[in-house]
Image (tube, rainbow, N blue to C red):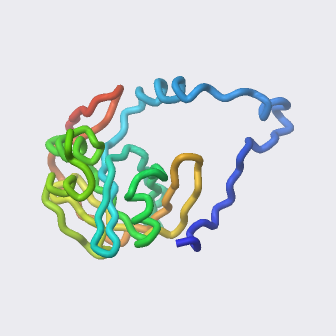
């Protein structure tokens, strides 16, 4: 899917004449960044993809709405996971926004259940598909079935800009969020 890799990548900050020396300032350490981000509560999603009979998925909090017209979102996926390759091969993915009662599915796809790897993760939950063939989890707060329109290479992750082709939602239930290293349930 090399045609998706058409992003402009900036490796250093843009020089700003209003703040001389800004580009020379050091960044924080990875540990400082990680510790600071632990305090940003984020909704928990399972990102899934399928290609040629193979399925893969991961638990993620790095999902963001971009626009509603056209309907677009962005998903960040670590380059070292199988789902990254399947997303690039298929050109599609699903974002499954988890409900509070789906913490076990989040743990399975996060590698937090011993002995559960690869396709065995899909034994947790009720899975189907919508229009792209990417796996969609039943009973989520919402699921977005998407086609990838651009890929941005960002260090250890790829950012997939997607157009939403189908959405399924429910209007009840608690949301599952991740905060300070733990899953938490909150009322909508």
User: What is the number of callouts on the image?
Assistant: 0
Q: Is residue 117 above or below residue 90?
A: above
Please state if 142 lies on the left or on the right of 85 as rendered.
Answer: left
The answer to whether residue 99 shows anywhere in this view is no
- Residue 20: image x %, image y %? 85, 31
Q: Is residue 114 above or below residue 58?
A: above
Q: Residue at x 27, y 73 (%)?
A: 53
Please state if 50 lies on the left or on the right of 26 as rendered.
Answer: left
- Residue 133: image x %, image y %? 29, 73
Q: Residue at x 52, y 72 (%)?
A: 1
Please state if 39 lies on the left or on the right of 110 as rendered.
Answer: right
Q: Residue at x 71, y 47 (%)?
A: 11
Outermost residue toward the front in this view: 115
**Looking at the figure, which quarter contains the C terminus?**
top left
4, 85: nearer the viewer:
85
When asked about the image quadrant of residue 122, the answer is: bottom left
When asked about the image quadrant of residue 135, the answer is: bottom left
When asked about the image quadrant of residue 128, the answer is: bottom left
Q: Is residue 161 above or below residue 98?
A: below
């Amino acid at each position: 899917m090399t045609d998706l890799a058409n992003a402009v990548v900036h490796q250093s900050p843009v020089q700003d004449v209003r703040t001389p020396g800004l580009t020379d300032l050091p960044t924080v350490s990875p540990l400082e960044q990680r510790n600071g981000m632990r305090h940003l509560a984020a909704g928990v999603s399972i990102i899934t993809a399928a290609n040629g009979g193979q399925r893969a998925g991961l638990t993620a909090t790095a999902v963001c709405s971009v626009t509603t017209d056209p309907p677009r979102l962005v998903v960040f996926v670590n380059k070292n996971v199988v789902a990254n390759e399947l997303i690039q091969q298929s050109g599609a993915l699903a974002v499954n926004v988890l409900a509070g009662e789906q913490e076990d599915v989040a743990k399975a796809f996060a590698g937090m259940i011993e002995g559960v790897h690869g396709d065995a993760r899909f034994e947790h939950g009720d899975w189907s598909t919508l229009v792209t063939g990417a796996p969609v989890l039943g009973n989520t707060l919402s699921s977005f079935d998407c086609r990838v329109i651009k890929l941005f290479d960002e260090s250890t992750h790829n950012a997939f800009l997607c157009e939403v082709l189908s959405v399924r939602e429910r209007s009840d239930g608690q949301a599952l969020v991740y905060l300070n290293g733990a899953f938490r349930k909150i009322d909508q």
